[in-house]
Image (spheres, rainbow, N blue to C red):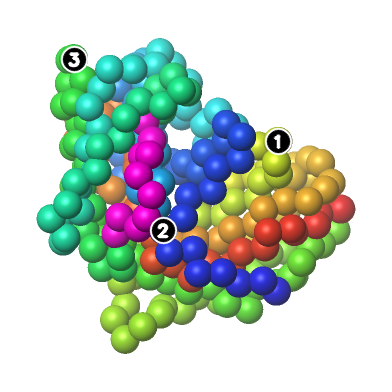
């Protein structure tokens, strides 16, 4: 089994981005959907009249792209801010700065300003779960059950509420899901992963950031400083 310290790493394969939905939702009757993750290279999608389909791993949000928003991620613990400029993908704002922006225990907040609305994300703690004893290692034949154990690194525990599972190939195809951290296994069949081949497998702890002013169903997940179970070449048959 390969293990890697993810720290604050966000995986990007071609136009694929790691994003998550579920957990805390937006509110206030807005028609602006927000979907994103705060990691080493944070991404936030901002769409008008959009809908979120987390199962669609390549395009998890639809709608009319808002391209002129101001998106700011703030590390309230360290007193620093990071502007996320609009990327070449319509509606997607992404950091171009390198290096870690946060550490375990830091609290991150978000502000999105558009022509018609202001959306805020409440300060949310960066967790530090570790995932060990992942099985089966290296690969498996469908159907199979992925299982693991959850612990925490260091002398201080910064708990995560959920586990984010990502299985994706170089074409941006695969499977992603967010489950309660108390659940330590998922079953993978041809319905979850349709095509045999080599995949990136990552299991990471996250916390959901409460949002105000966004359309219901919006969410931003806070991750980082995690020891994740990672397989760079996970073979699925």
Main SS type for the magenta part? loop
Mark 3 highlights which residue? 115
Q: Answer with the quarter of the image where residue 84 lies.
A: top left
Taking the magenta stretch, the answer to whether it contains residue 101 is yes
| Secondary-structure class at tag 2 | loop
Whole-angstrom CA distance, mark 3 to mark 2, is 31 Å
Please give left or right for residue 24 compared with residue 119 in the image.
right
Residue, disc 2 = 8
Find the magenta span and give its range. Answer: 93-102
Return the residue at label 1: 171
Q: Residue 155 lies in what quarter of the image?
A: bottom left
User: What is the C-alpha distance between the residues marked 1 and 2?
Assistant: 23 Å
What is the crowding at mark 2: few (fewer than 14 residues within 10 Å), some, or many (at least 20)?
many
Q: How many marks?
A: 3
Between 234 and 146, the one nearer to me in the picture: 234
Residue that appears at 81% across and 62% down: 140
Q: Residues within 10 Å of mark 1 (few under 14, many from 20)?
A: few
State the residue lying farthest toward the front: 98
Residue at 48% from the left image edge and 50% from the top image edge: 10
């Amino acid at each position: 089994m390969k293990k890697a310290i993810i720290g604050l790493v966000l995986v990007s394969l071609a136009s694929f981005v790691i994003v998550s939905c579920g957990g805390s939702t937006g509110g206030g009757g807005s028609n602006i959907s927000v979907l994103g993750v705060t990691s080493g290279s944070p991404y936030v999608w901002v769409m008008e009249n959009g809908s979120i389909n987390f199962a669609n791993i390549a395009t998890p949000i639809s709608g009319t792209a808002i391209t002129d928003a101001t998106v700011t991620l703030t590390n309230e613990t360290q007193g620093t801010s990071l502007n996320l400029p609009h990327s070449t993908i319509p509606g997607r704002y992404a950091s171009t700065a390198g290096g870690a922006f946060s550490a375990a225990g830091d609290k991150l907040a978000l502000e999105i300003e558009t022509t018609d609305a202001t959306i805020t994300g409440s300060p949310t703690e960066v967790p530090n779960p570790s995932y060990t004893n992942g099985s089966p290692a290296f690969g498996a034949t469908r159907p199979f059950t992925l299982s693991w154990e959850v612990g925490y690194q260091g002398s201080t525990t910064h708990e995560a509420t959920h586990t984010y599972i990502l299985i994706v190939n170089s074409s941006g195809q695969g499977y992603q899901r967010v489950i309660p951290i108390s659940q330590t296994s998922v079953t993978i069949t041809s319905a979850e992963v349709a095509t045999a081949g080599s995949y990136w497998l990552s299991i990471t702890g996250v916390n959901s950031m409460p949002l105000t002013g966004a359309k219901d169903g919006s969410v931003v997940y806070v991750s980082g400083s995690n020891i994740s179970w990672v397989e760079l070449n996970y073979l699925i048959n």
